């Protein structure tokens, strides 16, 4: 009996997340009606409150699901890269490119931060950070990445990909911004590579004061 009850609750939760995902993608968080959303799921508002507390709680669950899917897709793309270093870069670029997906753009990159706050504090982002940290640790051990603190490097790389995606989503011309964001991400990431050591270690000539600012 208890197993049946738990199974029903899990099914209801899945139905509400699916309905919320559809409503938030089509109408946006603010315009999405809880009555329509729950009716679409074939459930009541009471079921929504029981499972998620409120509309904001449902958005958090939807964002977590989509953001986790984004990370998995990025890892699948990265797995086709030549080596661990290229895999890390490919995953970051893939995550950035997903900012062009209308559902990702509206739910994860626009409504998510506006309603749920700092994305770096989301559980899905923390999981992604840990994966990146382990990848950086392997690359340091292989002598591919400079011997910096692995968590610091992972936070900077993950943060760069996330903020690039946020920039693209918020821009008036996402298609135009995307290649700029990807190029900058690759340049930033390359600074961690041992192969960039000589160039990175050189001090650039200071800019003339006339050009400063």
Image: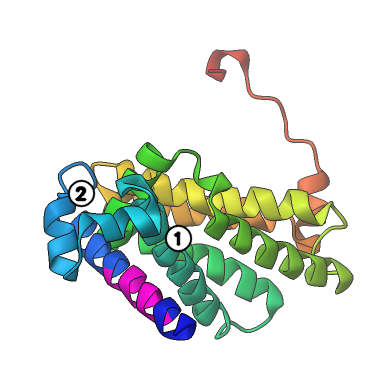
Q: Is residue 80 magenta?
A: no
Q: Which residue shows up at 54% across the image and 71% down it? A: 90
Which residue matches tag 1? Answer: 64
Q: Is residue 12 magenta?
A: yes
Disc 1 residue crowd, few under 14, some 14–19, many 20+, Cα 10 Å: some
Q: Secondary structure at mark 1?
A: helix
Residue 119: image x %, image y %? 50, 46
Q: Which residue shows up at 62% across the image and 19% down it? A: 208
Q: CA distance from mark 2 to mark 1?
A: 16 Å
Q: In the rendered structure, find residue 34 and report the number of the disc placed on it.
A: none
Q: Is residue 137 above or below residue 59?
A: below
Magenta segment, which residues? 7-15
Closer to the chain start, of discs 2 and 1, is 2
Q: Is residue 13 above or below residue 204?
A: below
Which residue matches tag 2? Answer: 28
Residue 213: image x %, image y %? 53, 18
Q: Which residue shows up at 23% across the image and 42% down it? A: 172
Tell which of 103 and 145 is nearer to you.
103
Q: Is residue 93 left or right of residue 40?
A: right
């Amino acid at each position: 009996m208890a197993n049946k009850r738990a199974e029903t609750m899990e099914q209801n939760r899945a139905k509400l997340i699916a309905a919320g995902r559809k409503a938030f993608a089509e109408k946006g968080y603010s315009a999405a009606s809880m009555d329509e959303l729950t009716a679409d799921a074939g459930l009541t508002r009471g079921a929504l409150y029981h499972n998620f507390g409120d509309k904001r709680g449902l958005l958090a669950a939807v964002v977590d699901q989509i953001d986790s899917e984004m990370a998995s897709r990025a890892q699948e793309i990265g797995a086709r890269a030549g080596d661990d270093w290229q895999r890390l870069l490919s995953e970051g670029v893939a995550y950035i490119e997903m900012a062009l997906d209308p559902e990702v753009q509206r739910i994860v990159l626009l409504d998510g931060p506006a309603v749920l706050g700092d994305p770096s504090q989301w559980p899905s982002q923390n999981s992604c950070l840990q994966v990146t940290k382990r990848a950086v640790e392997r690359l340091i051990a292989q002598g591919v990445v400079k011997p910096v603190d692995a968590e610091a490097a992972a936070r900077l790389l993950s943060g760069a990909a996330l903020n690039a995606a946020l920039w693209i989503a918020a821009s008036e011309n996402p298609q135009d911004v995307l290649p700029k964001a990807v190029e900058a991400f690759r340049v930033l990431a390359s600074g961690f590579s041992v192969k960039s050591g000589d160039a990175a270690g050189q001090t650039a000539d200071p800019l003339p004061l006339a050009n400063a600012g």
